[in-house]
Image (cartoon, rainbow, N blue to C red):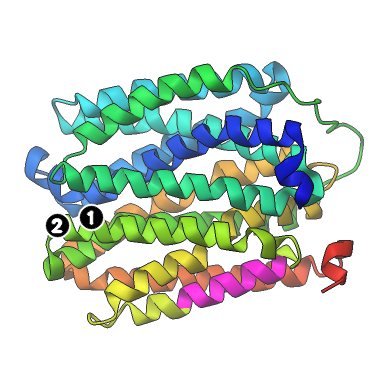
């Protein structure tokens, strides 16, 4: 753990990728708090507003599928700046959109940049830190959460409008492109050989990330809709920022713990506690407290899951992780519209029920995955617990 913070090359990688995580977190958290503004500005209903999330993650899915081959063909240095430049283009289109169709196009283009950068940065860090990947990824994904806090705050300060926040994203993305271009190229991974990958196990990781991302983005996107009738749109947007803040703080707090616990143990406990708190969010008097606790619970799952995957596929982590992260975006693509349709039919009170269903499915998947990977030996640091 000390090397994680005091090694010069590690510090350089951490600082260089920090801005990338900030911009990714801000971009994917902006849409939900602006749903009420979209309905007023463009005349769409809740299901239509939810399409912005679906288009964002559709673009991210396509880009993530291409990211793995692109990294092996061109390397990390050109892919990261290219992803940042595409984000800047999409955010500019969204900030200046005269129609809802243009806004959806901007969301899709921004999603392409998001997908390229998300895969490249996570794999770059995971490969650089090896057995210390879990604490490193938790620390950096805390910065992702910091961006996710800033996004809804910017929307709230603008009275629910998406425009100023997207303009800021575009500006910072340009700076991110310049910064990431200076990141040294890592050693190319060896993904050759005749060894067959256990694709059934890879499928379980895909399922875990699909449902996890659907749950995390679902809370961030629909919490505002759920709380707005109780506390007002602006206050609901600020409470959504509190959820993302809890996600950020949780990743900071869990960084030293993730160096000692098995990733599977940490992920199972996190999924179980998220389900408990989403069940509590059903009660109107508890929702304001429950949502931040959901954020704390979900915090370690995404970064620790990458470390778990790397242990399960030590020789093929580049190929498998790229596939898993690509399909992770399917969750919001499928569920955002479905939740929107349910809200349109039954009202915002169904939001915590829909999210609790996702959390229950997530817990089931990670329990099955833990059983499937139980033969992976713990690290020495974990055996000293």
Q: Is residue 215 visible?
A: no
Q: Is residue 283 visible?
A: yes
In the image: residue 151, left or right of residue 78: left
Check disc 2 and report the residue beneath it.
Answer: 233
Frontmost residue, 203 versus 24: 24
Asked where in the image residue 158 lies, by quadrant, the reply is top left
In the image: residue 261, left or right of residue 179: right
Residue at horizontal 63%, vertical 40%? 122
Asked where in the image residue 170 lies, by quadrant, the reply is top left
- Give coordinates of residue 150: x percent, y percent: 34, 45
Residue at horizontal 80%, vertical 25%? 188
- Give coordinates of residue 324: x percent, y percent: 63, 46
Magenta segment: does it hold 267?
yes
Cα–Cα gap, marks 2 and 1:
6 Å
Magenta segment: does it hold 214?
no
Start and end of the magenta stretch? 264-275
Check disc 1 and report the residue beneath it.
Answer: 237
- Residue 293: mark in rendering: none
Residue at horizontal 48%, vertical 45%? 144
Element under disc 1: helix
């Amino acid at each position: 753990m000390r090397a994680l913070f005091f090694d010069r090359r590690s510090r350089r990688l951490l600082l260089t990728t920090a801005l990338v995580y900030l911009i990714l977190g801000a971009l994917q958290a902006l849409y939900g708090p602006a749903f009420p503004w979209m309905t007023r500005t463009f005349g769409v209903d809740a299901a239509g507003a939810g399409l912005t999330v679906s288009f964002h993650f559709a673009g991210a899915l396509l880009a993530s599928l291409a990211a793995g081959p692109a990294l092996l063909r061109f390397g990390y240095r050109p892919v990261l700046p290219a992803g940042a430049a595409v984000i800047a283009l999409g955010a500019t289109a969204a900030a200046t959109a005269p129609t809802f169709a243009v806004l959806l196009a901007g969301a899709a283009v921004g999603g392409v940049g998001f997908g390229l950068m998300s895969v490249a940065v996570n794999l770059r860090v995971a490969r650089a830190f090896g057995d210390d990947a879990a604490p490193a990824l938790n620390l950096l994904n805390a910065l992702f959460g910091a961006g996710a806090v800033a996004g809804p705050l910017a929307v709230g300060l603008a009275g629910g409008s998406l425009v100023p926040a997207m303009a800021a994203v575009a500006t910072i993305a340009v700076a991110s492109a310049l910064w990431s271009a200076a990141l040294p190229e890592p050693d190319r991974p060896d993904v050759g050989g005749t060894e067959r990958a256990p694709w059934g196990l890879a499928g379980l990781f895909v399922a875990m990330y699909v449902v996890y991302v659907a749950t995390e983005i679902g809370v961030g996107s629909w919490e505002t809709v759920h709380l707005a009738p109780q506390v007002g749109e602006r206050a609901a947007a600020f409470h959504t920022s509190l959820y993302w803040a809890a996600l950020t703080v949780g990743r900071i707090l869990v960084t030293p713990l993730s160096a000692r616990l098995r990733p599977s143990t940490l992920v199972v406990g996190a999924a179980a506690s998220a389900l408990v708190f989403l069940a509590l969010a059903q009660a109107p008097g508890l929702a304001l407290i429950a949502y931040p606790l959901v954020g704390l619970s979900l915090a370690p799952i995404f970064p620790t899951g990458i470390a778990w995957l790397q242990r399960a596929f030590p020789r093929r982590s580049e190929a498998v992780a790229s596939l898993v992260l690509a399909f992770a975006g399917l969750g919001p693509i499928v569920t955002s519209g479905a939740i929107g349709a349910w809200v349109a039919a039954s009202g915002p009170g169904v939001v915590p029920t829909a999210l609790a269903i996702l959390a229950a499915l997530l817990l089931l998947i990670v329990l099955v995955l833990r059983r499937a990977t139980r033969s992976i030996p713990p690290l020495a640091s974990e055996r000293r617990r």
